[in-house]
Image (spheres, helix red, strand yellow):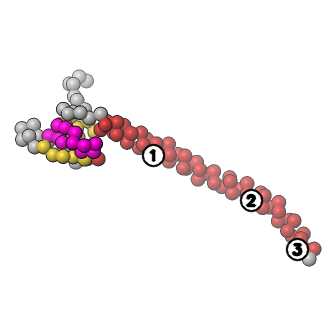
Amino acid sequence: MFSAIAFAQEAAPQAAAGGLNSIAGMAPILLLVAVFYFLMIRPQQKKQRQLNETINSLKPGDRIITTSGFKATVDSLIDANTFLINLGSGSNMKVEIHRSGIAGKEQVNTGKS
């Protein structure tokens, strides 16, 4: 009976040291999570926030680019999520598009370098 108590007393200091090793072992994983956040997640969130601000500021007459690559002009806002756009300058073809189908505003080329 006394030998079991002696073994239990010897195991206690090893358990305390093992707790410190487990925290040190998690440090590389935490470092990887932090690197992924700052290099991948945060820039993507910033880009999405800028796109949402651009879409919210659209008004009739603005030139946009759709996610499918079409260049169009905004004719009107149908509701909070739908725009009426004009695809062709000569054909006067109008299409409704959801806000998720807008990739951004078309950059105006002023011809200056």
Q: Amino acid at mark 2?
A: Gly
What residue do we see at 25% from left, 24% from top? 113
Q: Position of residue 105 (x, y in %)?
A: 26, 36
Tell me which secondary structure the magenta stretch mostly adopts: strand
Q: Nearer the viewer, mark 2 or mark 3?
A: 3
Q: How many marks?
A: 3
- What separation in Å lies between label 2 and label 3 (alpha carbons)? 21 Å
Residue visible at 22% across and 39% down in the picture: 77
| Residue type at numbered disc 3 | Ala
- Measured as percent of width and height from the top left, residue 107 is found at 25, 32
The location of residue 51, given as percent across then percent down, is 34, 39
The kind of residue on which mark 1 rests is: Met
Q: Earlier in the sequence, mark 1 or mark 2?
A: 2
Q: Decide which of tag 1 and tag 3 comes sooner along the chain.
A: 3
C-alpha span from label 1 to label 2: 34 Å
Camera-side residue: 80 or 18? 80
Residue 33 position within the rendered picture, expressed as x and y whole percent measured from the top left: 54, 50
Q: Is residue 48 magenta?
A: no
Camera-side residue of 22 and 113: 22
Mark 2 touching mark 3, by CB under 8 A?
A: no
Q: Residue furthest top?
A: 112
Question: Is 82 above or below relative to 2?
Answer: above
Mark 1 — residue? Answer: 40
Pointer 3 residue: 4
Quick check: 23 left or right of 92? right
Q: What are the residue bounds of the magenta stretch?
A: 75-86
Residue at the extreme right? 2
Q: Which mark is residue 18?
A: 2
Residue for point 50% across, 42% down: 38
